[in-house]
Amino acid sequence: MTRSARLVGVDVGGTFTDLACFDAETGLFRTAKVPSNRGDEAVGFMGGLGAFGAPAALDAIVHGTTVGTNALLERKGARIGIITTAGFRDVIEMRRRDRPQTWGLWGDFEPVAPRDFRLEVPERVLADGTIRQALDPAAMRAACARLLALGAEALAIVFINAYANPANEKAALAVAREIWPNPHVTASHEILPEIREFERSSTTALNAYLQPVVASYLGKLEDALAQAGFGGSFHIVQSNGGVMSTAAARAFPVRTALSGPAAGVIAAAAIARAAGFTDIITGDLGGTSFDVSLVAGGEAALAAQTTIDFGLVIRNPMIEITTIGAGGGSIAHVDRGGLLAVGPESAGSRPGPVAYGQGNSRPTLTDANIVLGRINAERPIGGALQRLDSEAAAAAIATAIGAPLGLTVEDAAEAIIRVANARMAGAIRLVSIERGHDPAKFTILPFGGGGALHVGALIREVGLRGALVPRYPGITSALGCLIADIRHDAVETVNLELDGLDAAALAARMATTGRMTRQVVAQAGLPITEIEVGFALDMHYLGQTHTVAVPLPARLDAAGVTLDIGMVRAAFEAAYHAAFSRLLPGLPVRIVNLRTTATGRRPPFDLMALAPPAGASLAAAGRGTRPVYFGGEWREAAIFERLDLPPGAVIPGPAILEQPDATIVVDPGLVVRVDAFGNLLMERLP
Amino acid sequence: MTGPAPAHGLDPVTFAILTGRLEQIADEMDATLYRSAFNPIIAEARDACHGLYHAESGATLVQGQKGLPIFVGAMAFAVRAVIDRVAREGGLAAGDTFLFNDPYLGGTHLNDFRLVRPLMREGRLFAWLASVGHWLDIGGNVPGGYNPSATESFQEGVTIPPVRLFRAGVLQQDIVDILAANSRVPRSNWGDLNGQLNALDLGERRFHALLDEYGDATVAAALDAATARAEALMRAHIAALPDGTYRFEDHLDNDGIVDAPLTIALDLTIAGETMRLDFSRSSPPCRGPVNIARSTAVAACYVALKHVFTDVPANAGCLNPIRFEIPDTTFLGAAAPRPVAGYTETILRMIGVVFGALAAAAPERATGAPFGTINALSVAGHRPDGQRWVLFSFFGGGLGGSPASDGLNHANNPISTATMPPAEILEAAHPVMVTEWALRPDSAGPGRNRGGFGACYAFEILDPGGAEAALLGERGRFAPFGVAGGGAGALNRFAWQDGAGAHAPPMASKITGIRLGRGDRLRLETPGGGGWGDPLTRPEEAVARDVRRGLLTPAAARRDYGVAIDAAGTVDAAATAALRAGRSA
């Protein structure tokens, strides 16, 4: 088993590559931030790694990547072919017969494989798993040859009802593997043995679409690491917040779609747990969007399915990240009906806010923060610009917002911030109140550079318990790579009625799948303290099409799995009641899917490694005061160098805390306290 | 350009914040029902809608963004019907909840059950909450309710006038029992009713919390301001159109009883910032089930305008600048008990006609006609254990080409945001096998930007006891039109194959009582959308791409686009130039 004395987490984002290095022997923690190199991310990766000395001296690297995400969003995946059951080659193009917007009929859709790259073969399995027509291997061979002649680099095989019986798909896969010149072949039963052909087809096709891209990226990294003498282990963070081997990432690249953000949520949960909080909401404010996730009882909420873009659906458990189009670069405007709106149109990071002086003249949320003195115009975050043009930002706000609404420039800027806060609050309500969670029990944990500007307002707007600002908000995702557990998920459609359930048979099936998933985790090659295998069922009343996720108290142990009908029924009723508050006694209940998760616990990471150095003092951290606009008036706000604050320091608002990659606003009426880890705990004044 | 400042001393920031909060509550009500509904028409097809309505007028104040578009227009009439009933009888109490499905009191058809509940604040009515959802079956001659041969609404199902399902919070079990006794699928209806109650409960809690937080007067002011804003936006859009009267007509194949076309004729007049929609020249009320109530007709126009002017918020203010002429001498303003089960076909044609008339006023905003039929297909039988099964679904087609792009392939209709049940779900739930689920070649209306392609769906019956099928569809004789020089999409086609050979319905796309045995097959081919712009100006490469993809035959490429091309997609440039020059001359 690998030693992991020197461990590095690397998160490659769109603009920056963040790195965190932890030396278990010395207890030393270091960070690094370098520009990402779009198009050849391996360059930024290796450059950043150099900050920690020779890669040969490192023992393990865990990586959060956006290579898959970007390939999907920019449609830069591989040229793929799809082979389907006769009559079904158009499934990925026909979707579920939806359209991009409720209102407005413009727009079209190009699937990741054009129709001439989608071929059909004779074969048929019925819904009950009966094979009506066996696969014709000759037709399969001919289809593969045709796709190769067209130039397909990867292949997806999706047969109807393969979830009920994968025999024909397995036969097709065997034929394809004989012919296909590379390993980029995916069959739907391997990716998602679950009913609903569009979701399964889309997920399988996107996996094939990403395979060559992700494999080539990982190959480059592995070559570069080997060349640099690195001999340790190298792992990838999945969208479910767990870590997997690079072999698994090559086979299931679709599971990396939210790799980086998922790592951030995992780190946020760990930081909060260490600080004594198990119920948190993470908020990541970027240039164009605000991403929110919920962690309840220490567990990050997972979504079963995510839509990357219209028609591009991935059905695989992923950390549930709710995104709204409100970021620092979001443009504020007054519409023709007189409504002040912020976003979703964004100036992004280029040209960026008006104050960046890069050609945008429409005011953004960041411009409002600058004009009100909340962001220090002389100390731009990220370090790329020398100073920010506060005057230009003020002029833009006066013209676009102040004049039409009859507000002073300060009040117009504050109005922009309040409307943006309201949109962020809406996203928080969506993941909390709308999912049955009481926000008064939750603490918001901002990460990324911008979130901490707004958390104070969000505490009040949503009625949150408080905010926890980690010591290094900008490298949260890299830190998550150091912390994340190893994880493997499996889903299978079982379609069983609860009445008369053969619990022993289901328990045996759970044990089989449980052992398989545990095996995957055990082989990942990172040190772990234990492997836990858990189960959930997707269930509903017979006749419903949607299901509720029902976590089972059953666990896999040496003897297998113990299960009885009463346990399943009680778990279903608890989950259904929590979701809808209205049970339907007397109606039959069905178990649709079995979900199995194996988690390999990594050795605990002592977050005290991040704590402020001894000898810090509040006085030495002070940087005087400056006027900041709060609630309709200019106030003198105390300014502090955040990283120089000692544990135990208490600072009442109004105050601004600055650090190289983040700004923290303490509104009047709020107070922050520095905890032993160097986190800031923000609360309402009693 | 700026609009009016919000009224009643409401500051712009509070207005902006409350606008978002109110919409979020309606969205959450929608989502609650989708997740807890029993029948796939709500759960998957989202045939439902929720909102908040004006205490006195019933006018729409707030609607969910995902609500079925046609209901967004129709719900105000439904709430109005309850208001009228309460005005007549008095005695409104907190905890009352009204239930009804009368299509002449609130639009659409009998399957759509409306629940209306007062939102009471300190004993006074603040506003109404309402929920509407499509129940799977409420009796009538045909399972699912889409009876193409109905001549009275009594043959379409049971009609429930506005009755109190809850009196001061107490469920009236008698009503539930009457409903259960009149459906083939009482369990499904009971589940959906509970889902709608879940949504109303949730909405009531959320609105009370919002009113407690901001104060009733502030929220009321924000609701007024939102209505004023929608009106201002709509007036600005109308004012930007050139004044004048624009005429457009389209037709239904027949009413399912009398095999003669029905005309929807519109005279659309723009005068300054007002619009008049006059449908007086349309056909008279008909015997078959394609009549609609006036409220349904107004709702259809609302849907059409919202698709063109997408930024106008979904509340009653947007209809203030518009006058309607929908006389009861037309089948668009029919009265009870004229049958209405096929209302979708009529409103789809009306929406197309509004698009067609606006295309003359503003071609840069126009789209070719959407495919324009829901194709309500039911296939039903009895399992060996005697239990009844009913496969019921609506089918997709192509949307029209637009100035920006080709039309979307295999989309839902403009009245809906419905997603379609997957073939695997249909096969798992019913003894049928899907033999084809594909795009339909040569179905898109040609154009510089062509329409989207329709689809082919084919089923084989697996039930040893056989099955009975019915279809209510349209566009079998009048194809979806193109605009700005674009051509029409393909006609709808339906056929079935039994031991005696292939058959097609005598009334094109409307038929009941098809008897099918095990191994017999059904096939439905749906229209594509109409094209936008002259097809002779479509780039050759775009035509060649469709040929390579097997979506356009070389013969159609030559006929519709003047492109000489072989089956492999190779264009003969010289022959194409000659063809195109000859056509445009």
Image (tube, coloured by chain):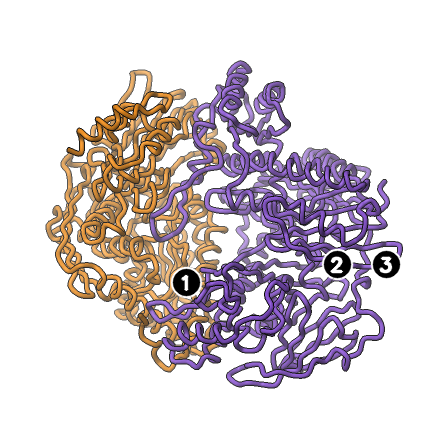
Chain colours: A purple, B orange
The x and y percentages for residue A460 are 58, 74
Q: Chain of mark 2?
A: A
Q: Nearer the viewer, mark 1 or mark 3?
A: 3
- Mark 2 is surrounded, within 10 Å at the Cα level, by few (under 14), some (14 to 19) or many (20 or more) other residues, namely many
The residue that disc 1 covers is: B166
Vertical placement of B217 versus B295: above or below? below
Which residue is found at the position 54% from the left and 65% from the top? Answer: A328
Q: Chain of mark 3?
A: A
Which residue is found at the position 44% from the left and 40% from the top? Answer: A96
- In contact (CB < 8 Å): disc 1 and disc 3: no
What residue type is disc 3 on? Gly
Secondary element type, mark 3: loop
The residue that disc 2 covers is: A31
What residue type is disc 1 on? Phe
Secondary element type, mark 2: strand
Q: Nearer the viewer, mark 2 or mark 1?
A: 2
Vertical placement of B360 versus B199: above or below? above
What residue type is disc 2 on? Thr
The residue that disc 3 covers is: A27
- Mark 1 is surrounded, within 10 Å at the Cα level, by few (under 14), some (14 to 19) or many (20 or more) other residues, namely some
Which picture quadrant has residue A618?
bottom right
Q: Nearer the viewer, residue A26 or B467?
A: A26
